[in-house]
Image: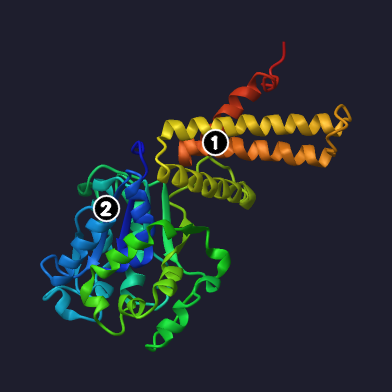
Amino acid sequence: MTSSPLPSLLMVAAHPDDEVLLAGGVLAQYAAAGAATSVVTATWAPDSYRAGELTEALTILGAGKPRMLGYADARNPRSAPGRTRLCEAPLDEVVALLVTHIRALKPTTVITHDQYGQLTGHADHIHTHRATLLAVHAAGLPHLYPDAGEPWRPDALYVATHPASGVGELGPLLERVDKTVHAAPDEHVTARIDVSDVVATKWAAICAHRSQVEGQRALPALLASLTDEARHRILATEWYTRLDTGPLSGPVQDSLTSVTGNESGLWDMIGQLGDLFTRRDTVSGLSLEQQWTIQVLKLSEEVGESAGAVIGASGANPRKEHTWSDVQEEVADTAITSLVTLYRMLGDQASAFLTDVLKQKSSRFQPPADTGSTS
């Protein structure tokens, strides 16, 4: 299975309007850069008025046509007459539907609600979170849901969230209508995205959900009651937590303690940096080949800085007052840039690729293993 040439993004949302409230900025940025973006919505019938609002919002965001599972909203049985409420739907049934969409759309990145149910703890948000996590893992396994299409494993899975330190003005806004605020611990957040450049697009998409803007308790209505400046502050930042999409890459271990947390954590951080740089370059309109070229040039720059630090530390250049600690830091920067470059080219396969190359290189210098035979 291989990824598409450009990053592609799928948002799995519980209700119409969740897609833009949680990830509207990232969806708009990806679409503006030419990446494929899609949204699957778990509740409300495709022939409901909310479906019409969703269609308009997705058009504004550049996220294609609605894809609706058609379950009933937990708080509004009229949302899908005769259908099961999403929060009561069998988990395996919801997972199977999501696997079908994931395999058909082949997204490189999937986003959904966090495990807290997005600030207010809505039951539909929590059920969508659980189903999406299971679906992302199942979609890549050929023996699960064999009738749902060819296996596909997304490269990245993120949950949209709000850290405790980032709730800000949203807290009092929700508490004003007696809603509970469930924020994630700050250390759980792995990405903070500045979407200030597309706030106007994001707000226009929120306004497309007219029934929610014209209400009193829904978040779009609360946002509409604010000044432009206050609303911009709330909408200009989006937070995400990256989760595993499947088994870690690398050689087969002979013990459950063979893989240390440090190795896993290293590639997690490398992946976050690589995804951040790719996202920024994509928004800037650079092709993948251009991005890789610039990244390799950055690697060359780091090597030059390491050489300059050595010259200064050895006293060969009296104008440079470097120490050997500076040299070590520059070498570390070079190693980090090398790993980020490899990750940006190979994604989650970078770790396994590096291990294979290391084995090949080391075999040229290490003596053959002693077979125990005698002459």
Q: Amino acid at mark 2?
A: Gly
Crowding near the residue tagged with mark 1, few <14, some 14–19, many ≥20 C-alpha atoms within 10 Å: many
- On the rendered image, what quadrant is the N terminus found in? top left
Residue that carries the numbered disc 1 in the rendered image: 341
- Residue 144 visible at all: no
Q: Quadrant of the C terminus?
A: top right
Label 2 and label 1: CA atoms lie apart by 30 Å
Residue 138 position in % (x across, y down): 33, 52
Tell me if residue 56 comes above or below residue 62 in the rendering: below
Q: Residues within 10 Å of mark 2 (few under 14, many from 20)?
A: many
Q: Is residue 9 visible?
A: yes
Quadrant of the rendered image containing residue 253: top right
Which residue in the protein does label 2 denote?
62
Horizontally, residue 180 falls left or right of residue 218, namely right
- In front of the other: label 2 or label 1? 2
Residue drawn at the location 34% of the way across and 62% of the way down: 200
Above or below, 203 against 297 in this view is below
- Closer to the camera, 342 or 198? 198
- Mark 2 vs 1, N-terminal side: 2
Please report the residue visible at 39 percent of the width from the left and 89 percent of the height from the top. Answer: 178
- Which residue is rendered at x = 42% and y = 82% of the image? 173
Nearest the viewer among 197 and 211 is 197
- When asked about the image quadrant of residue 303, the answer is top right
- Residue 127 pos. (x, y %): 33, 70
Identify the element where label 1 is drawn.
Answer: helix
Q: Position of residue 143 (x, y in %)?
A: 29, 46
Q: Would residue 292 appear left or right of 369 to someone viewing this image?
A: left
